[in-house]
Amino acid sequence: MPLTTEAFGLTDVGRKRQHNEDAMLVDAPLGLFIVADGMGGHAAGEVASSRATEVVRQHMVSNRHLLKDLSTNTSQDARNAAQALMEVAIQRACADIFRMALSDPSKRGMGTTFVCLAVSGNKGVIGHVGDSRIYLVRHGQCHRLTEDHTLVAAQLKAGTITKEQAATSQYRNVITRAVGIQESVQVDTLIVDLFPGDLFLLCSDGLHGYLDDDEVLPLVQGSSPVELPKRFVDLANERGGKDNITAVVVKVSGEGTLEAETSEAQSRMEALRKIPLFRHLTYKEQTAVLSIATTRTFPAGREIVVEGQPGEELFVVIRGRVVIEKSGVEIAELRPGGHFGEMGLIDNAPRSATVRAVEPTRTMVISRSDLMGLMKRESILAVKMLWSFVQVLSDRLRATNSELSEARQELAVAQAIQPFAEE
């Protein structure tokens, strides 16, 4: 049976505010889930969050074929189209709210944070602006899939303040991106594989402001999905409730026909995390890399890369077995989890060896052009990747120097004993 979702949400005014400027959408049939936290005062925040939610929903309904295509089409074009759909929907909401504010002086400056999850088959598309968040609880671990667009978060990234200073900073509520403040806004998007048992939490800062990231997992494990929104809201109110509070919980279920796809998706993530180039990335960043990866299957005997020919792709073995040949001589064998061709991510230099499938083999493929595009969008990821490249090259240089040193020693010994051998 295909993957299914059940979702539950709750929004609350909290203990300090007079109006609830949060908005949420729980539309399981459409596969669309939203949390928006409005700002602006004089009911303008309520207008902004509600309007953003409605505009995005309308755009998704009008273009649902793009989401449906994502569930059956694994190509990079389908993924790009789904991410573009999410970005355009949020941009349309941004422009719409901005125009409303221009026409009504009482709503001038209104805007909203926005976080959205659109589900299609075994894929999810995330859109994010501001400091509302999405958490993913998977296999006994909790991962935050969004990064706050706040001044304090930017200072933490830059290393100008510590986590302890951030917790007490007078600027911790200063948002650097919001929907509607200007005519357009930079939107973060992410595509995630969905597994049976996954649980997503979408929430406004009225909740996560009272909740440490490491508290999410035990709270989720101790409750059923239908109970969780109220449990989260009650916790925020018990700890102060100074802001509006919204929590939406999405639980993924399914088995049977998607078991093989789920197993492959898990293998892809496990393999990626073991590759030195990607080991320093966060779970969110690794997920972003997976979102640009494609898969290819090769029959037994097929050459995957050919010595001397140019190439710009990294290959990771997901299923099957390959051999590496240098000048026609087999020098190594790779099984699931093994990878080859990473230097193609740096330049289009000729391949140094031939890699051949010795049995039907399934590979994950990451191209240089797609990775460079991701690195342009994600500056922190780019720095980590470049540092990893340096480390890999340094390790290879040390290994080469060691091999050369051993070769010199062997040559020196051979030269020393040669006169005696001749006698």
Image (tube, rainbow, N blue to C red):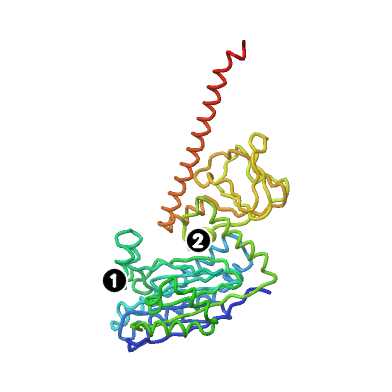
User: Residue 233: x and y, percent?
Assistant: 43, 84
- The 10 Å Cα crowd at callout 1, few under 14, some 14 to 19, many 20 or more, is few
Residue tagged 1 = 168
* Discs 1, 2 touching: Cβ within 8 Å: no
Quadrant for the N terminus in the image: bottom right
Q: Is residue 200 visible?
A: yes
Q: Is residue 369 above or below residue 191?
A: above
Residue tagged 2 = 288
User: In the shown orientation, is residue 150 left or right of residue 137?
Assistant: left
User: Residue 183: x and y, percent?
Assistant: 36, 71
User: In the shown orientation, is residue 221 left or right of residue 255?
Assistant: left
Q: Is residue 160 above or below residue 240?
A: above
Disc 2 residue type (three-letter): Ala
At x 31%, y 66%, the residue is: 164
User: Residue 97: x and y, percent?
Assistant: 38, 77
At x 46%, y 49%, the residue is: 388
User: Residue 157: x and y, percent?
Assistant: 36, 60
In the displayed orientation, state which residue is furthest to the top.
423
Pointer 1 or 2: first along the chain: 1
* Depth order, front residue of 128/12: 12
In the displayed orientation, state which residue is furthest to the left.
170
Rendering quarter of residue 181: bottom left
Q: Is residue 61 visible?
A: no
- The 10 Å Cα crowd at callout 2, few under 14, some 14 to 19, many 20 or more, is many
Which secondary structure, mark 1?
helix
Quadrant for the C terminus in the image: top right
User: In the shown orientation, is residue 349 left or right of residue 264?
Assistant: left
At x 60%, y 60%, the residue is: 75
Disc 1 residue type (three-letter): Thr
Tag in front: 1 or 2: 1
Q: How many marks?
A: 2
Q: Is residue 222 above or below residue 330?
A: below
